[in-house]
Structure formats: C-alpha cells, structure tokens
Amino acid sequence: MLVQHGNATWVFDTIELASRQMDDSDKEALRQKVNQIFELHDCPWRLSDGEFFKLDGDFIGARLATTAHDALTANRFAGAGDEFAKARQYLGAGDVREAIFYSGHSFESVMKVLTGLDHANGDKLIKELAQQGFFDDLPEAVRNGFTDQVLKALPFLRNKLGGHGQGAAVVNIPTVYGDLAIQIAAAFHNFLISKHLERSPPPPPEPLREPAARELADEIPF
C-alpha cells in the first residue's frame, strides 16, 4: 500500500532504510530491480549504494554516467564512486567548478587503485598505466598519442577549470563544461574498469553443492 499510494519521499526513505538491513546480494538485487523499473518508466531517479539520487532531465548521456557509477560500486572502487557521485550532485546544485574538480578526482582515484600509486598526479598515473601494459593492445606508434591526447583531457579540465585550480580570471563556467567533465569521466571509468576486468577477470562462481544422500532421505519435519 505504501509503495502504490504513499508519498514518494516516504517510499524512497522506506526503501533506503530497508536496504541498510540487507546483505550485499539482496541489496544489489534491489538496486537492479528498482533502477530497471525507473528506466522502464523514464523516471529520473536512480538507486545506488542504498541511496536515491536524481538525474538531470537535460543531462546528455545520463545512462552512461549511471553505468559508470554502478561499475565503480560493483568493482570495489568505492572512493572513486563517492567522488563521481559528488561531481554529479555539485552539477545538479549549479556548482560547475566543483563538478569538474570531482570528476577529475574520481578519474585519478580509479587510476590509483589500478596502478597501486597512492601519491601520484594524473600525468604520472597515466604514464604508469602505460608502463604496466594497460594499452599494449594498441599499436606501439599510437600509445603515446593515446595517453597524451586522449587520457589527459580530463586532467586538463580539472587543472584549468576545477574548483581548486581555476585562476582569478575565470568567473563563471557554463554548465555545459561540467556536463562534459562528467561524461568524460564516465567514459574513462567504464573504459578502465573494462581493461581491469580483462586483465583480472573475477573468479568463476562456485558450483552448486550437491545435497548429501542423508539430506535427501531426511523426513519432512512436520
């Protein structure tokens, strides 16, 4: 009755509270089911990490951003996932500088996990990814251009326009640049996590345990 007829705020609060009592597998099943229903009905809300957040109705590539955040959460990049969520929240609140800053920061956090370097900047992290062979499937003549001209786009935006790096001459940053930073971050997250899973695939699920003969012979206890 609450779900069908209740106030949306109460329904969301109830689902969030219930998810906190669930184990990880049940929580993930709930997230997938709720988001599937929202997507089916073009609802701008999504559930992630046990909390609801709203997608901007004019946000280009919202599904890409949602996919990226889900991938971060599912693959143990919790810190980067939190930073990416902050970027989207800041953009929704109109703070473009902080949105750009946290987009770039989340990208660096993913690279830190992958490289094992905790105190390196974006440039060093990108070079380390290349040195560790993440891009060896590209022709050797292309790799330097890929790291310098493609992967450094987001660090450039963060350093020049981000909340902690823009100079006094920059007063207002149009929202579209915050959109761009989040979309680039989403694409980079999905790309790097795909590369990570290629290099370190998850273990296969354990086979179902066959019931012992004694268990099959047990009488029904009622």
Image (cartoon, rainbow, N blue to C red):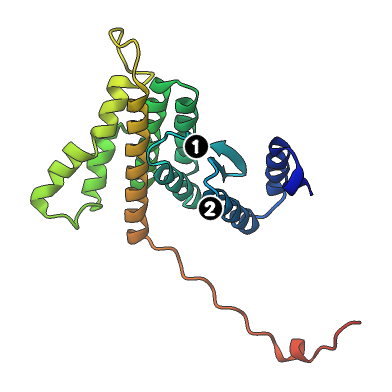
Q: In this view, does 179 lie to the left or right of 148?
A: right
Q: What residue type is labelled 1?
A: Leu
Question: Toward the viewer: 74 or 63?
Answer: 63
Q: Residue 40 carries which label?
A: 2
In this rendering, would 19 be left or right of 171? right
Given this view, does label 1 or label 2 mark the residue nearer the observer? 2
Q: Is residue 164 above or below residue 41?
A: above
Q: Which of marks 1 and 2 is nearer the N terminus?
A: 2
Disc 2 marks a residue whose amino acid type is Leu
Mark 1 residue crowding within 10 angstroms, few (<14) / some (14–19) / many (20+): some
Q: How crowded is mark 2: few (under 14 residues within 10 Å), some or many (20 or more)?
A: few
Query: Measuring 34% from the left and 32% from the top, which residue is drawn there?
Result: 181
Q: Can residue 119 be seen in this snapshot?
A: no
Name the one closer to the observer, 125 or 3: 3
Residue that lies at the very extreme toward the right in this rendered image: 222
- Residue, x 39% and y 38% (percent of image)? 109
User: Taking 99 as reference, is 133 left or right?
Assistant: left
The residue that mark 1 highlights is 55
Residue 218 position by quadrant: bottom right
Q: Where, by quadrant of the figure, is residue 11 drawn?
A: top right
Quadrant of the image containing the C terminus: bottom right
Of the pair 199 and 28, the residue shown nearer to us: 28
Q: What element carries label 2?
A: helix
- Horizontal placement of 16 versus 170: left or right? right
Res. 150 visible in picture: yes
The picture places residue 106, in percent across and down from the top left corner, at 40, 36
Residue at 21% x, 47% y is 131
Percent position (x, y) of residue 74?
50, 52
Q: Which mark is residue 95?
A: none
